[in-house]
Image (cartoon, rainbow, N blue to C red):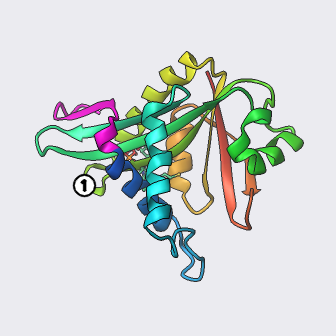
């Protein structure tokens, strides 16, 4: 990434509405089957507020990380990444459902601290300029600061470009298949 107008910085609380909006937009965009229900389809204002509070945690909590990319020329945000650190796969409570599978199958070290990429997005107008790669690289330092020994991420099998992106950054595919629903996902890790 060598455009000086695009600057990575830690997200602030006033970025939370942007982060929350993008988090849902990426999940909506990820759905390729028109019959697949969106989990926030029937949400009311209280649900959206709870979601914003959860996303704010990525800005405020010591074990979470949020970075944005600011287009300083245009004055808007054009990229974001959210990640969270865990003491171990075994102790990652919110995600235990799908991580349990990985532990049971022995494809991940179950008792090492690790960091999980929660969301990643780059604005279509600035894609293929290395922005996602740069965002993923900055969270590696955060992951190390949390004592993380590796980073975990997954994507739908229908997103081979995301797999390529991760492979270029040194990630390894550890598993392909359904995790918590019937959608095939590719799981990858990078040792730190
Ligand atoms: C996936 C995404 C984050 C990539 O962002 P980006 O800034 O364009 O990625 P980078 O420029 O760092 O790409 C690095 C490499 O990944 C691969 N890659 C990335 N996007 C690609 C695409 N659309 N097609 C093919 N290869 C792609 C390429 O090998 C690329 O290197 P190259 O441009 O030198 O060929 C972006 O397309 C996006 O926000 N998509 C929608 C949200 C999403 O899918 N998020 C990931 C959820 S798991």
Q: Quadrant of residue 38?
A: bottom right
Q: Quadrant of the N terminus?
A: top left
119 and 48: which is toward the camera: 48
95 and 169: which is toward the camera: 95
What percent of the width, then of the height, locates residue 2?
24, 31
**186 relative to 111 in the view: left or right:** left
**Relative to 82, is 64 above or below?**
above
Residue 130 seen from this side = no
Residue shown at the point (25%, 54%) measured from the top left: 125
| Residue ID for mark 1 | 125
| Residue 2 lies within the magenta run | yes
Secondary structure, mark 1, is helix
67 and 53: which is toward the camera: 53
Residue shown at the point (55%, 55%) measured from the top left: 160
**73 relative to 184 in the view: left or right:** left
Q: Which residues are magenta?
A: 1-15
Q: Quadrant of residue 183?
A: bottom right
| Total residue callouts | 1
Which residue, as the protein is rendered here, is positioned at the far bottom?
35
**Crowding at label 1, few (<14), some or many (≥20) Cα neighbours within 10 Å?**
few
**94 relative to 28 in the view: left or right:** right
Q: Quadrant of the C terminus?
A: top right
Residue 121 seen from this side = yes
What percent of the width, then of the height, locates residue 124?
30, 56
Residue shown at the point (58%, 20%) measured from the top left: 146
What percent of the width, then of the height, locates residue 156?
61, 58
**Relative to 68, is 150 above or below?**
above
What percent of the width, then of the height, locates residue 115?
61, 31
Residue shown at the point (49%, 43%) measured from the top left: 165
**Relative to 62, is 71 above or below?**
below
40 and 184: which is toward the camera: 40
**81 relative to 123 in the view: left or right:** right
């Amino acid at each position: 990434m060598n455009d000086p107008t695009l600057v990575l910085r830690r997200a602030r609380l006033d970025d939370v509405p942007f982060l929350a909006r993008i988090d849902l937009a990426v999940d909506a965009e990820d759905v390729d089957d028109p019959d697949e229900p969106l989990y926030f389809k029937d949400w009311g204002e209280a649900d959206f507020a709870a979601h914003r509070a959860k996303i704010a945690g990525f800005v405020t909590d010591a074990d979470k990380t949020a970075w944005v990319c600011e287009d300083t020329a245009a004055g808007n945000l054009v990229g974001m990444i959210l990640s969270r650190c865990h003491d171990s796969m075994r102790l990652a409570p919110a995600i235990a459902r799908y991580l349990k599978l990985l532990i049971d199958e022995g494809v991940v070290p179950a008792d090492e601290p690790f960091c999980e990429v929660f969301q990643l997005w780059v604005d279509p107008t600035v894609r293929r300029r290395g922005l996602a790669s740069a965002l993923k690289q900055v969270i590696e330092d955060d992951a190390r600061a949390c004592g993380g020994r590796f980073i975990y991420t997954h994507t739908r099998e229908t997103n081979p470009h995301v797999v390529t992106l991760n492979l270029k950054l040194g990630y390894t595919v550890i598993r392909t298949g359904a995790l918590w629903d019937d959608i095939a996902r590719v799981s990858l890790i990078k040792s730190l």
